[in-house]
Amino acid sequence: MTILIGLTGWGDHPRLHQNHSNTKDKLITYSSHFPLVEVDSAFYAIQSPSQYENWVTKTPDSFRFVIKAFQSITGHDRKNLTNLEMKQLIQDFKESIKPVVEANKLNALLFQFPPWFSLQSKNINKLRKLREWMGPLPVALEFRNRTWLEERQADTISFLKKEGWIHVICDEPQAGEGSVPLVLETTHSQNALVRFHGRNVHGWNNHGQENWREVRFLYRYNQTELLQWVEYIKQLEKQVETVTLLFNNNSGGDAYDNAKQLIQLLNIEYEGLHPKQMDFFDLL
């Protein structure tokens, strides 16, 4: 059983990089602290294979990536693509990530769907097609519409198991239709994926405001909340080979501290990471 704890992105964490100003080395610094990372930039643009090759070479052999699917694939841009156009996008996406796959550093491909992706037959069909087109690659599915996990939870979990999707377990604000409840159900024997978005209800629903992105994930988990997650993780450990946990509550820079806290609470000491860079104050 393996527990992998990391953050979404490696650059936007002030506490992690406060003593290291060289931005080119941020992934190297990051991978001296955590065994995996979520590649969030892949959501905004399909990255080049050479970019992934660069990231692969900068990380230890045991390091793993969760790669977020491009936004046009999950429908965030609201474009109505034909099957042919979607298949081409999928092909481009798969080609881009080949260096990660070939280096055996892929943990999962994360398909996060928008709040308007509700429980409808056309969306069920889309999930079936995407799963088929992705082939044997490990794919994880995150809902942002609660109809899937509130109205038909048992059916949804059964569908994900049958189709081979990894159910993304979300710790997030309970803020109406555009959020999902915490459902501690695994759908894949190899991997359970958990994403921590914080519990800031006001920030979650603050769409349209200038500071929306600054406050959406503004939340710091307290000791009691993390201890509850220690118990949840023990439940998940019994069902899968790997439990993957990603902290996304970084509007206020809290993801790094919370991830470190959870690692400590679970008494985990990761081996095979990059050596930590020596800080001047460590010498005193």
Image: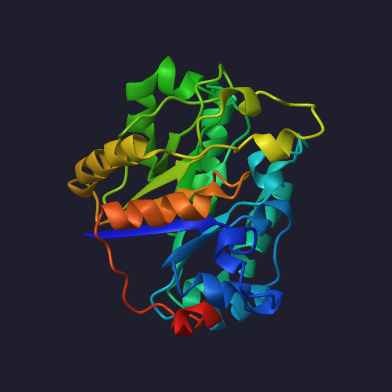
User: Could you tell me if residue 116 is visible in this image?
Assistant: no
Q: Residue at x 57, y 41 (%)?
A: 112
Question: Relative to residue 172, is residue 130 depicted above or below?
Answer: below
Quarter of image, res 227: top left
Question: Residue most toward the left?
Answer: 238
Position in image of residue 88 (x %, y %): 70, 56
Position in image of residue 169 (x %, y %): 40, 38
Number of numbered callouts drawn: 0
- Quadrant into which the N terminus falls: bottom left
Question: Relative to residue 37, is residue 281 depicted above or below?
Answer: below
* Color encoding of the figure: rainbow
Question: Relative to residue 46, is residue 57 depicted above or below?
Answer: below
User: Could you tell me if residue 7 is visible in this image?
Assistant: yes
Quarter of image, res 4: bottom left
Q: Residue at x 39, y 41 (%)?
A: 163
Position in image of residue 90 (x %, y %): 63, 55
Q: In this rendering, would 54 be left or right of 60?
A: right
Q: In this rendering, would 204 be left or right of 169?
A: right
Q: Residue at x 45, y 58 (%)?
A: 6
Question: Residue most toward the right?
Answer: 210
Position in image of residue 250 (x %, y %): 59, 47
Q: Nearer the viewer, residue 190 or 91?
A: 190
Q: Nearer the viewer, residue 69 or 93?
A: 69
Quarter of image, res 171: top left
Q: Residue at x 31, y 34 (%)?
A: 184
Question: Relative to residue 189, is residue 51 depicted above or below?
Answer: below
